């Protein structure tokens, strides 16, 4: 199985400051069709997870443009340009290229 | 409005079985594959498995292979997760989800507790 490794696991951030989460996969996430199926999700306590980014860098509908995704191959990054209070939660990367799909361990973003 | 609603969770003894249901509404159910994802406090999110839009293919994570089965009834807009030989480590909130582009839709989750 593809192992997804996130860092950091805990991310205290001051409001208005940027934040960055790294996600590395144990093998390339480039699919045979040329797509790279790397997604980012956020989970908040009491809520269902929500996808923020699909195929590395595409924002889902309604996701603020302060969120951006980048990367290629085995190395990916989620960035928040200016953290707001509503951004608190646990962020997960997930690969959808190889079976079985796999998630990273999660990064807990909190406000300092 | 588009919705996924899970049901069927509860407390069950190790070794027993449970069937979860996920009812969809507000969109063309038959055009979508469905995933089951579970969440535990200790391990975070774990992808459980998928069933294709027409039921022709299913994939599972290794830890549930041979014990869990995903099925669907397109006439009832419902996806099922049959869980057999349950273990304490299967304790989690179980979500069904489309994980589709552009329709990424999740249910509210249903709690399964495996305990004697």
Image (cartoon, rainbow, N blue to C red):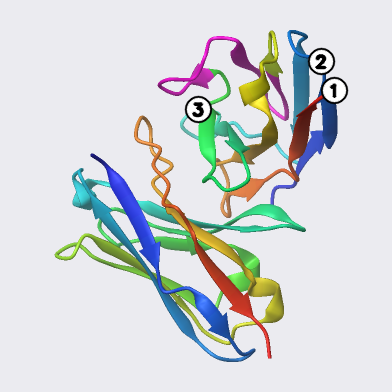
Q: Marks 2 and 1: CB-CB under 8 Å?
A: yes
Which residue position is annotated with label 3? A35
- Mark 1 neighbour class, 10 Å CA radius: few under 14, some 14 to 19, many 20 or more: few
Against B113, residue A48 (above or below) is: above
Whether residue B100 is visible: yes
- Chain designation of label 3: A
Against B58, residue A31 (above or below) is: above
Mark whose residue sits in front, 3 or 1: 1
Viewer-nearest residue: B24 or B85:
B24
Q: Marks 2 and 3: CB-CB under 8 Å?
A: no
Verify whether residue A26 appears in magenta: no
Quadrant occupied by the N terminus of chain A: bottom right
Which residue position is annotated with label 1? A112
Q: Are the numbered discs 2 and 3 placed on the same chain, yes or no?
A: yes
Upstream in the sequence, badge 3 or badge 1?
A: 3
Mark whose residue sits in front, 2 or 3: 2
| Residue found at x 55% / y 91% | B16
- Mark 2 neighbour class, 10 Å CA radius: few under 14, some 14 to 19, many 20 or more: some
User: Magenta segment range?
Assistant: A58-78
Q: Is residue B83 left or right of residue A70?
A: left
Numbered disc 1: secondary structure: loop
């Amino acid at each position: 199985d593809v192992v997804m490794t996130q860092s950091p696991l805990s991310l205290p951030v001051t409001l208005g400051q940027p934040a960055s989460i790294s996600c590395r996969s144990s093998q390339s996430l480039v699919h045979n069709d040329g797509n790279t199926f790397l997604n980012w999700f956020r989970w908040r306590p009491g809520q269902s997870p929500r996808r923020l980014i699909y195929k590395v860098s595409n924002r889902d509908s309604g996701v603020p443009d302060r969120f951006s995704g980048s990367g290629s191959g085995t190395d990916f990054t989620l960035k928040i340009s200016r953290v707001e209070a509503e951004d608190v939660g646990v962020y997960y990367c997930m690969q959808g290229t190889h079976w079985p799909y796999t998630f990273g361990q999660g990064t807990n973003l909190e406000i300092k | 409005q588009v919705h996924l609603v899970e049901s069927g969770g509860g407390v069950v003894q190790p070794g027993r079985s449970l069937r979860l249901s996920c009812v969809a509404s507000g969109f063309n159910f038959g055009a979508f594959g469905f995933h089951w994802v579970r969440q535990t406090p200790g391990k975070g999110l774990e992808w459980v498995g998928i069933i294709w839009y027409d039921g022709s293919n299913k994939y599972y994570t290794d830890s549930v292979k041979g014990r869990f089965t995903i099925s669907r009834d397109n006439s009832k807009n419902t996806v099922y997760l049959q869980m057999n030989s349950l273990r304490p480590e299967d304790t989690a909130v179980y979500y069904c989800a489309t994980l589709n582009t552009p329709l990424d839709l999740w249910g509210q989750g249903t709690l399964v507790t495996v305990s004697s």
